[in-house]
Amino acid sequence: QVQLVESGGGLVQAGGSLRLSCAASGRTFSTYGMGWFRQAPGKEREFVGAISWRGASSISYADSVKGRFTISRDNAKNTVYLQMNSLKPEDTAVYYCAADRFTVADNPSEIAYWGQGTQVTVSS
């Protein structure tokens, strides 16, 4: 029912910035919670941040990225963004866009829809 396509990944130096975008299909985008997860080689997929259908009043972040990453959404464009600043080598991972009805849980096994992922590599 929902198709997600990520873009914006790449190779950056430590301390640099990237903005990831996730375009979602469907006119009901505004009723879906959106989020970002990441998965480093050999590790489990982990929660990064999420924004509910209510928008800025319901945003959460993992402690590891709080203060550095910002999630936002533009319902008119059916797009969610992840602005990543002060990047660290530890942030290197494949980043996945996620969507679910109203809210996105921090447990990846509970997520209804996933994008294909975009690689983010941070060099030291």
Image (cartoon, rainbow, N blue to C red):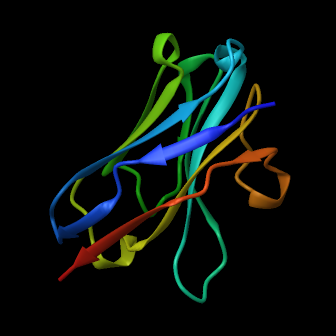
Q: Nearer the viewer, residue 11 or 103?
A: 11
* Residue in view at x 20 percent, y 54 percent: 17
* Residue in view at x 84 percent, y 52 percent: 110
How many discs mark residues in the rendered view?
Answer: 0
Indicate the position of residue 6 as horizontal and vertical percent values.
Answer: 49, 46
Picture layout, residue 20 above or below residue 40: above
104 sits left or right of 91 in the view: right
Picture layout, residue 86 above or below residue 105: below
Q: Nearer the viewer, residue 78 or 108?
A: 78
Indicate the position of residue 68 as horizontal and vertical percent values.
Answer: 30, 51
Q: What is the quadrant of residue 123 in the picture?
A: bottom left
* Residue in view at x 35 percent, y 57 percent: 9
Indicate the position of residue 93 as horizontal and vertical percent values.
Answer: 46, 72
1 sits left or right of 43 in the view: right
Residue at far bottom of view: 42
Indicate the position of residue 47 as horizontal and vertical percent values.
Answer: 61, 58
Q: What is the quadrant of residue 11 in the picture?
A: bottom left
| The N terminus sits in image quarter | top right
37 sits left or right of 72 in the view: right
Q: Nearer the viewer, residue 47 or 39?
A: 39
Q: What is the quadrant of residue 13 in the picture?
A: bottom left
49 sits left or right of 12 in the view: right
Q: Nearer the viewer, residue 70 or 38?
A: 38
* Residue in view at x 60 percent, y 89 percent: 42
